[in-house]
Image (cartoon, grey):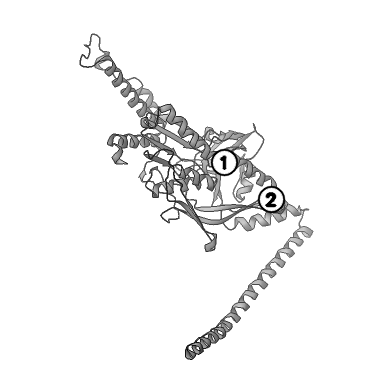
Amino acid sequence: MKKFLMAAATGTLAGVIFTTQVAAPLLAQDASKTSNVYQQLDLFGDIFERIRAQYVEEVDEGELIEAAINGMLTSLDPHSSYLSPEDAEGMKVQTSGEFGGLGIEVTQEEGFVKVVSPMDGTPADEAGVEAGDFITHVDGESLLGLTLDEAVDLMRGPVGSEIVITVAREGADEPMEISIIRDTIKLTAVRSRIEGESVVLRVTTFNRQTSPNLAAGIEAQVAEAGGMDNVNGFILDLRNNPGGLLTEAIAVSDAFLETGEIVSTRGRAPEDGDRFNATPGDLTQGKPLVVLINGGSASASEIVAGALQDHRRAIVVGTKSFGKGSVQTLMQLRGEGAMRLTTARYYTPSGRSIQALGVSPDIVVEQPRRTPEADTAEEESAFKARTEADLRGAISNDSLTQDEIEQIKKEQDEALAAAKLREEDYQLAYALDILKGLSALGPDSK
């Protein structure tokens, strides 16, 4: 026992000596780094004083400091930034679901302003702005060299005023000018309707209204269909949804899941991570689910699509999503301003990060662009071909009752409506066909 205690004591002493020897240079390095930081801060103070005293024009000191802070944050990544008191208040208003502007979500890519997505029913959407467009000029003024916040400020203005943006679009030979009338943006977070026997849930944003609107939409459409037995499945349309609140993305995912992880976040330190799980209760009672995504589906949309895809709860259809897999925390600062700082990455239940990669659909379905040739063909097809029933004196079908004939005609009308939908929204029509196929195979096919 004495030998053991001695060995232990010797080992401990050796450990102390070793630690002391290694720690000395480490402490010196830390002291050197701290000294260097203070030197850099002194340099910042010197530059600030020289600008204030010697710049050709008098400067606003507050604006100068705000610009320095914003420059520090925007150098980190495209989503970190400083919010002035006015911008911070605007952020709160936006998450509540009503704000003024054009109705587009934008980001910055290699110095250019890129449209993540236009929001449904907004002035930008109605004017023809598309996800992936690059905005190069606003009212003739170039955006090149401006920060994202500065570019956004140029696009803001009084409700009812006109703005002309110049857009570069992939596949277009020349930039195009788009005129937009600014308006108050009132976002309807979820629009629901019935297409045939399927319920379509169009989610446009993730704000505080989203999960309550989703639950109400499901309940209303199921009631209109005459009960869940009359519904063959659900389509969750997340196309051109730029994201929003993480809490709402979790709630929307939870609406379709009974159990399991929805998303996890991992920050710089292990203790900064978090994990969010589903609670019992699938609002759709396990009915087949198709999720629609495209290049305008970002952030919270990708959390939902990734969670439902990993749990094999839904078939994801469309094109690859935007690829924003980072979490921003809004931190209040003194003076009523705020800082939006990227604090974590999020991961789908299988542990994959979609940062810069996006969610890949299970079935890739492109949305064809409408062309003048297609419109002409559509007009020509309006003159439908004559059939036997159109011929004068054609004999009747005596093998069916009148009710059976009416049922067949109803099914034919539904098929024609589906064909028309393919021309208007090919991706949605494809999703509806999937649900019809699953319904035809029966409940064991889920």
Q: In percent of the image, x 69 and y 45: which residue is there?
A: 86
**Amino acid type of the residue that numbered disc 1 sits on in the rendered structure:** Arg
Q: Residue furthest top?
A: 393
Asked whether the residues under the numbered discs 1 and 2 touch, taking CB atoms below 8 Å apart as contact, a structural biologist would say no
398 left or right, relative to 57: left
Query: If you read the primary sequence from the N terminus, does the residue marked by circle 1 or circle 2 appear first?
Result: 1
76 left or right, relative to 51: left
**Amino acid type of the residue that numbered disc 2 sits on in the rendered structure:** Gly
Q: Is residue 66 above or below residue 24?
A: above
Q: CA distance from mark 1 to mark 2?
A: 22 Å
103 left or right, relative to 68: left
**Nearer to me, 166 or 238:** 238
Q: In percent of the image, x 51 and y 40: which residue is there?
A: 211
Residue 320 got which mark? Answer: none
x, y (%) of residue 231? 37, 32
x, y (%) of residue 349? 43, 53
Q: Which residue is mark 1?
A: 208
Q: Is residue 360 above or below residue 386?
A: below
Q: Residue furthest bottom?
A: 3
Q: Which residue is mark 2?
A: 337
Q: Which mark is in front, 1 or 2?
A: 1
The kind of secondary structure element at disc 1 is loop
x, y (%) of residue 379? 38, 23
Classify mark 1: residues with Cα within 10 Å, few (<14), some (14-19) or many (20+): some
**Nearer to me, 178 or 9:** 9
Can you see residue 296?
no
Classify mark 2: residues with Cα within 10 Å, few (<14), some (14-19) or many (20+): some
The kind of secondary structure element at disc 2 is loop
x, y (%) of residue 191? 49, 33
**Nearer to me, 200 or 162:** 200
